[in-house]
Image (cartoon, rainbow, N blue to C red):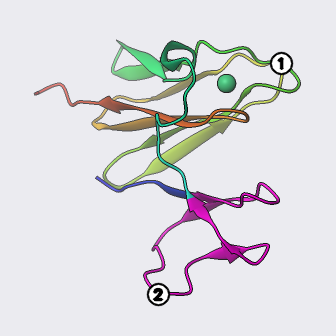
Amino acid sequence: MQELILKKCSSCGALVKVINDCHCPCQIRCCDKEMITLKANSVDASMEKHVPTFAVVNNSLKVNVNHVMDEDHFIEWIMFVTEDKEETVYFKPGDIAEAIFPYKEGILYSYCNKHGLWSQEVYSKDE
Ligand SMILES: [Fe+2]
């Protein structure tokens, strides 16, 4: 499974998706500092309001994040990463944090503008 690597700048808040991570001593930097690698489900906040949940409907994943969608606190996107593909659905305040993807094995991610990265594994039908 392809791993999602996101790095965030602790100064300006820039968020970067990394395709091949840097393993040099220099690391990936922003604002003159090493960027922080985000770890899913590691922030001290309500799991049930951030972790994406899903239902399998007609061979599709119907994904939902049960989170407020206020101006200053909302789910920015939901991403589904599979063996060979990733898809992202973006949201703005007032939207409903829902997305539909083809059903296959993968990892669902959601990103809250205040509480960071959250994930949920999706297993194939055979497991
Ligand atoms: Fe949040």
Residue at the image position 34 percent from the left and 29 percent from the top: 103
Describe the element under mark 2 as helix, strand or loop: loop
Helix, strand or loop: magenta stretch? loop
Describe the element under mark 1 as helix, strand or loop: loop
Q: Quadrant of ligand 1?
A: top right
Identify the residue under disc 2.
24
Among the 4 quarters of the image, the one containing residue 126: top left
Identify the residue under disc 1.
70
Image position of 5 with respect to 98: above or below: below
- The residue type indicated by label 1 comes to Asp
Tell me: 42 left or right of 83.
right
Tell me: 22 left or right of 78.
left
Neighbourhood count class around disc 2 (C-alpha, 10 Å): few under 14, some 14–19, many 20 upward: few
Q: Position of residue 42 (x, y in %)?
A: 48, 37
Q: Where does the magenta region start and end? A: 7-36
Tell me: 104 left or right of 12.
left
Q: Which of 45/17 is in front?
A: 45
Tag in front: 2 or 1: 2
Q: Position of residue 10 (x, y in %)?
A: 72, 57
Neighbourhood count class around disc 1 (C-alpha, 10 Å): few under 14, some 14–19, many 20 upward: few
- The residue type indicated by label 2 comes to Cys
Residue at the image position 73 percent from the left and 14 percent from the top: 68
Image position of 60 with respect to 88: above or below: above
Q: Position of residue 76 (x, y in %)?
A: 71, 35
| Circles 2 and 1 in contact, beta carbons < 8 Å | no
Residue at the image position 47 percent from the left and 49 percent from the top: 86
